[in-house]
Image (tube, rainbow, N blue to C red):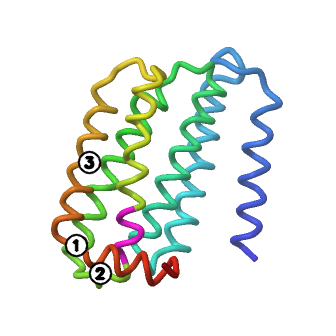
């Protein structure tokens, strides 16, 4: 019940932001503080909800954080900071975090390989932003794309058979 109520309040808060004018002249710092609190609460909810599968929880957090950053950028007058900095940095850090977590916690390959691969594929999105000219600084997107491609190649070389087995098992191929 607490989860559903929290989701309803968070959704209403994000929707209420649309009632105020866009840009920094709207409600300014109050908007940023409120969005920060709501985002933190949403991230905590998702982290607690998906705590049993770290890789799956990471995918959820990457998607949520990326979407919230883009929305926040839109509400503050669209300066493209979300696509230029936030999304590539969050994606690259999540890839590294999943790699470290999987090794440190010695998580079974079947429990993480699909979501680790999905995290890496999400890391390729900044390359698309770069190709479409949506970013103002190319370096974060290029670094994120390089990390994604490197880890994708590494996964294929070291765990290629496991990846194919899990995909065939989960997707009934």
Which percent across, then down, holds residue 41? 59, 57
Between 75 and 116, the residue placed more toward the observer is: 116
Mark 2 and mark 3 in contact (Cβ < 8 Å)? no
Where disc 2 sits, the SS reads: helix
Cα separation, mark 3 vs mark 2, equals: 20 Å
Which percent across, then down, holds residue 2? 71, 73
Badge number at residue 149: 3
Badge number at residue 109: 2
Name the residue at the top extreme: 25
Side of 48 where 153 appears, left or right = left
Location of mark 1 (residue): 159
Which percent across, then down, holds residue 120? 35, 55
The quarter holding residue 162 reads: bottom left
Badge number at residue 151: none
The residue stretch that appears in magenta: 112-117
- Identified at 55% across, 52% down, the residue is 64
């Amino acid at each position: 019940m607490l989860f559903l109520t929290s989701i309803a309040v968070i959704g209403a808060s994000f929707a209420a932001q649309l009632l105020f004018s866009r840009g920094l002249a709207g409600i300014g710092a109050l908007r940023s503080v409120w969005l920060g609190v709501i985002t933190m609460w949403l991230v905590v909810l998702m982290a607690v909800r998906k705590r049993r599968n770290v890789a799956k929880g990471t995918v959820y957090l990457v998607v949520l954080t990326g979407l919230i950053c883009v929305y926040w950028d839109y509400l503050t007058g669209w300066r493209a900071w979300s696509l230029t900095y936030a999304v590539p940095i969050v994606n690259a850090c999540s890839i590294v975090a999943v790699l470290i977590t999987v090794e440190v916690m010695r998580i079974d390959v079947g429990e993480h390989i699909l979501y680790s691969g999905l995290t890496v594929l999400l890391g390729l999105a900044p390359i698309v932003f770069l190709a479409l000219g949506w970013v103002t600084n190319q370096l974060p997107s290029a670094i994120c794309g390089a990390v994604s491609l490197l880890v994708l190649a590494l996964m294929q070389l070291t765990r290629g058979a496991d990846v194919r087995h899990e995909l065939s098992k989960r997707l009934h191929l």
